[in-house]
Image (cartoon, rainbow, N blue to C red):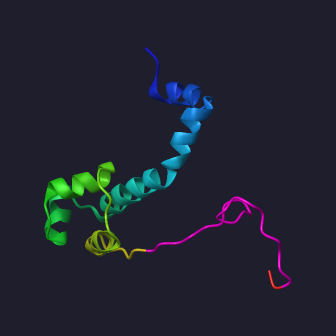
Amino acid sequence: MIKIRDLHKKLMKDPAYRKEYDALEEEFALIAALAKARMRSGLSQTQLAKRMKTTQSTVARLESGRGKPSTRTLSRFAKATGHRLKISFEPVRGRGGNGKRRPQSASS
C-alpha cells in the first residue's frame, strides 16, 4: 500500500499537479491556521461555535476549507480563540504582481 506522503511527492513531479497544488497554498495555510488557533485555545468546535454565536458545522466548514469566510468571520474566529486577525501581503521572490521584476529604486 502506498503512503499518502509518497504519493504526494510523486505527484508533485507532474507540472500540472504542482501548479494546482501551488494555487491552493494560501487556502491550505488558512485552514491550518484556523485549526491551530482553535487547538491552542483548548476549545472544541462546539465551544468555539458558542463563542462565535454560530454552529459547530460552520466551524467545521471553516476548518475544512469549504466555503469562503469573510474577514468579519475570520475576525470573530480569532477573537473567540483569544487571537487577533492579521492579514499581510508578502512579495513573491522579488517580483511584482505581474510576474515581472521591478526595478529597485534608490530608496529601496
- On screen, residue 19 above or below 59: above
Please state the total of marks drawn on the protein image: 0
Give, as a single range, the part of the protein colored magenta: 86-106
Q: Quadrant of the N terminus?
A: top left
Question: In the image, residue 11 lies at what x, y percent?
Answer: 55, 28
Question: In the image, residue 42 lies at what x, y percent?
Answer: 27, 61
Q: Residue at x 52, y 30 (%)?
A: 8
Q: Residue at x 66, y 66 (%)?
A: 91
Q: Quadrant of the C terminus?
A: bottom right
Question: In the image, residue 32 lies at what x, y percent?
Answer: 41, 53
Residue 24, magenta (yes or no):
no
Residue 90, magenta (yes or no):
yes
- The answer to whether 21 appears left or right of 65 in the picture is right
- The answer to whether 19 appears left or right of 92 in the picture is left
Q: State the image quarter where residue 86 is shown.
A: bottom left
- On screen, residue 105 above or below 56: below
Residue situated in front as seen by the camera: 47 or 9 = 9
Q: State the image quarter where residue 89 is shown.
A: bottom right
Q: Residue at x 46, y 18 (%)?
A: 2
Question: In the image, residue 69 lies at what x, y percent?
Answer: 31, 63
**Prevailing SS of the magenta stretch:** loop
Q: Is residue 44 visible?
A: no
